[in-house]
Image (cartoon, grey):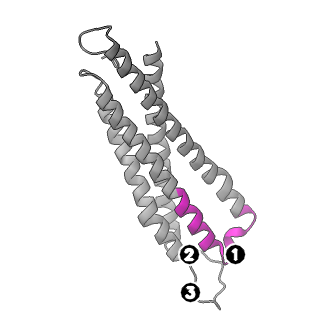
Amino acid sequence: MNSFFTPDSPTSSPVGSATQSDSNRWLVIILGALAFWISGSLILDLVVMPSMYITGMMTQSDFVSAGSVMFSLFNRVEMLCAAISLTGLLALAATLPEGFSDRLRTVTMLSLFLLGVTLICGYSLTPEMAGLGLSLNLFDVSEVAPEGMNQLHFQYWSLESLKLLTAGAIATWCLRAFKFAES
């Protein structure tokens, strides 16, 4: 089905151009939120965390509290970006005429999945990792990662990979829709 932004019966009314303008505006908002989110995730995962590991910051006693604050703040930004993209896709679905592509429903489900991933990371995984890493014994200065931390790291990287792939798929769909709308 190639008619993404066109209704079943072609019209050239001002209402159709207003709908297309609204659709373009929502696509730009969604793409902006996803670009900010993906770039922030990549910077955190590929620059900040490896730099902290290489410099030995992860072995210092106050790293857990600093890391917890950093990840908690970033998780809130992620939730905001997920909510913006989900809202944009829902608004896009409302502004499009009848007969729009079924892919929008799929992309909206993917956006709901992204929101779920951010909620899991923000309210389950990050606090659990911080709790495991927090040493409550001041006299125990072991530099061994707590048991179970590797499993949490695996869960984090799995969710992070799924998040980046899903956000990339949504961004690709929005770019295609935007290019189609421009032509």
Q: Read off the residue under disc 3.
A: 136
Mark 2 residue element: helix
Quarter occupied by the N terminus: top left
Residue 72 picture location, percent across and down: 52, 63
Magenta-drawn stretch, dominant element (helix, strand or loop): helix
Q: Is residue 38 above or below residue 103?
A: below
Q: Read off the residue under disc 1.
A: 60
Residue 165 picture location, percent across and down: 47, 41
Tell which residue pokes out farthest to the front in this image: 14
Q: Read off the residue under disc 2.
A: 133
Q: Is residue 23 left or right of residue 135?
A: left
- Label 2 vs label 3: CA separation? 9 Å
Few, some or many C-alpha atoms within 10 Å of disc 1 (few <14, some 14-19, many ≥20)?
Answer: few
Stretch of the chain drawn in magenta: 53-74
Q: Is residue 59 magenta?
A: yes
- Label 2 vs label 1: CA separation? 11 Å
